[in-house]
Image (spheres, rainbow, N blue to C red):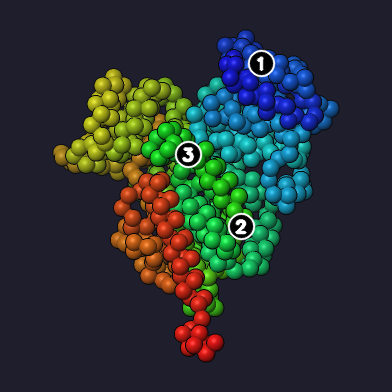
Amino acid sequence: MLDQDLKDQLAAYLERLQQPIELVASLDDSEAARELDALLDDITALSPKISRATGDDPRKPSFLIRRAGTQVQVGFAGIPLGHEFTSLVLALLQVGGHPVKIDEALAAQVRALPGDYRFETYMSLHCQSCPDTIQALNAMSVLNPRIQHVAIDGSLFQAEVEARQVLSVPTIFLDGVEFDAGRMSIEQILARLDTGAAARAADALNDAAPYDVLVVGGGPAGAAAAIYAARKGIRTGIVTERFGGQVLDTMAIENFPSVEYTEGPKLAASLEAHVRSYGVDVVTAQRAKALQPAAQAGGLVGVELESGATLRARTVILAPGARWRQTGVPGEDTYRNKGVTYCPHCDGPLFKGKRVAVIGGGNSGVEAAIDLAGLVEHVTLLEFDGKLRADEVLQRKLRSLPNASVHVNAQTTGMIGAAGKLAGLTFTDRGTGEKRELQVEGVFVQIGLLPNTDWLKGAVTLSPRGEIGIDDRGHTNLPGVFAAGDATTEPFKQIVVAMGGGSTAALSAFDHLIRHSAPAASDAVAA
C-alpha cells in the first residue's frame, strides 16, 4: 500500500511512540476495505508498539487508533491518505503518547471541559482545509477521552452524505447535530463548547502590555511584517482569526521564487513557525472590530476585537487580507454550504456524478471547471462578460471537454433550492434578455476577492473598492498606522508581493518608532 520511501519516513516517526497502540479495524469485502487492510498491515509492521485488532463499527471500512488499555482513541472512516496522511501520522503519535504540541493553558482548558462530546467530521482527501479541523478534534480527543472523534471520507460514505445533506467539507456534527462547517482551530471549537472562554480570553488580552508593533492579519503580508519587526528586537504582536489567511485555501503554489511547488497549508505552517521562532506574541481566533487612532487611545493606536478586548500599540500594521467575493444574488446565503460553495478542490468530490455550475470566467473559474469536469456529470461555466478572461490555453482545454459548456453574457440572478439544499440557479442572457434556469446541485463561485476592510470604514482612507490607501512605504493616512497585502491599493495580489509589502510596512513602522522616540532638538542641545 505504501511505497518504500513513505514506509521509511513513517518508521522514523513511529520511533517516537511512547506507549503501545492498537489499530482496531472494521472491514467488509469492498475494494476500499482491502486497501485499508493493506495500509494497516504496513503500519503495524513498522513498529513493535503497534498491534491489530478486529472491530464491529457499522461504518466499514473504518478503524480506531486506540492507546492500549485506555479510552484514548481517534477514528477514521475511510483511508486517510492524500491531504489526510499527516492527520494519520499525528494521530498515531499522539495516541501513542507523543505530546500534543499546543499551549499548556489551551490543553488544560480542553481537559477541563465537562460532559461527553461525540464529533463526526465529513472530509475529502482532496481538501486542504480539512486537515486543520481533523487534527484539532483528534488532539482534543487525545487530551480528553470524553471527547470522541471520527473523520469520515465523504466520497466513501455517499449515503450518509446524502442523508445529512453534507455539501461542503469539512462539515462537523456534534452528537448527531450539525455543529459547523469550514476550517476550525482548537481555539474556535473551544469557544463554542466553553461559553466562558471568550470572556476570559478578552480579560487576558485587555491586560496585555502595549506592543511596539501590532500586526492585524496572519497571511503572508502579516507574517512577513511580524518577522521583520521582531528581528528589530521590539515587542511585536500579531492578531488574526486564522493564521495563513487566504493562503490556506490555495491548492498549488508554483510561482514562489526558489520553491518550485508547494501548497497553501504547508506555506502557512512554515510562516507561523517562522513567526513564532522570533518570540512574537501570536493571538489567534480573534477578529478585529474597529481601529482606534492614537488620539482616541491615549497616544497609542487601539485595535478593538469582537470579543470585547482592545489591544494597544505604538504602531499598527494592517494586513487583514481578502475573502471570496459573493454574487450577492437571492438564495446565495440560504444555500451556502448546501450546494453553494467557493472551493472546488475541497468540495468537488461531494458532487461526483452530479450537474454543477461555475460562476466566473477568469483563470480560477476556468481551472475550477476543468477540475470538476473530471468528477461530475456535467459542468456549466457562466461568465458575466462577453468573453472569458482566462488564459487561452485554459480556455482551449475547457472547450475540449465533452461534459463542459460555457455561457458568456450570463448574469446570475438567483439560487433556488428544494428540501433545504440547492436545486439550481437562474440567469439572464445579457445579449438577448432571455431569462433561463439551470438545474444543478452545486454552484462554485469564482469571481475574485473582496478586501476585509469593513471594520476600517471611517478610520482610514479606503478606495472605492474598499482597499486601504497606502504610499510606496506602506503608510496609511493615519500616523503610526501602516498596511500591506491584498487589502491595500497594491495592484498585484500575489503572495510574494504581499510578503514584500509586509516587510516594507514593518521597516517603515520601525523607522516611525525611531523618529518619534528621539529627543526633541532643544533637549538634545541642552544635554
Q: Nearer the viewer, residue 23 or 218?
A: 218
Q: Which residue is mark 3?
A: 264
Drawn side of residue 181 relative to residue 71, left or right: left
Task: Say which amino acid is labelled 1.
Answer: Asp
Q: Residues within 10 Å of mark 2 (few under 14, many from 20)?
A: some
Instruction: Name the residue: 48% across, 83% down.
Output: 520
Question: Is 464 rendered above or below residue 23?
Answer: below
The disc labelled 2 sits on which kind of residue?
Answer: Asp
Q: Which mark is residue 42?
A: 1
User: How far across and how far down the image is residue 88, in percent?
Assistant: 64, 28
Real-space Cα distance between discs 1 and 2? 42 Å
Question: Is residue 252 something one can see in this rendering?
Answer: no
Residue drawn at x 66%, y 59% is 201
Q: Amino acid at mark 3?
A: Gly
Res. 281 mark: 2
Q: How many marks?
A: 3
What residue is at 53 percent from the left and 46 percent from the top?
A: 271
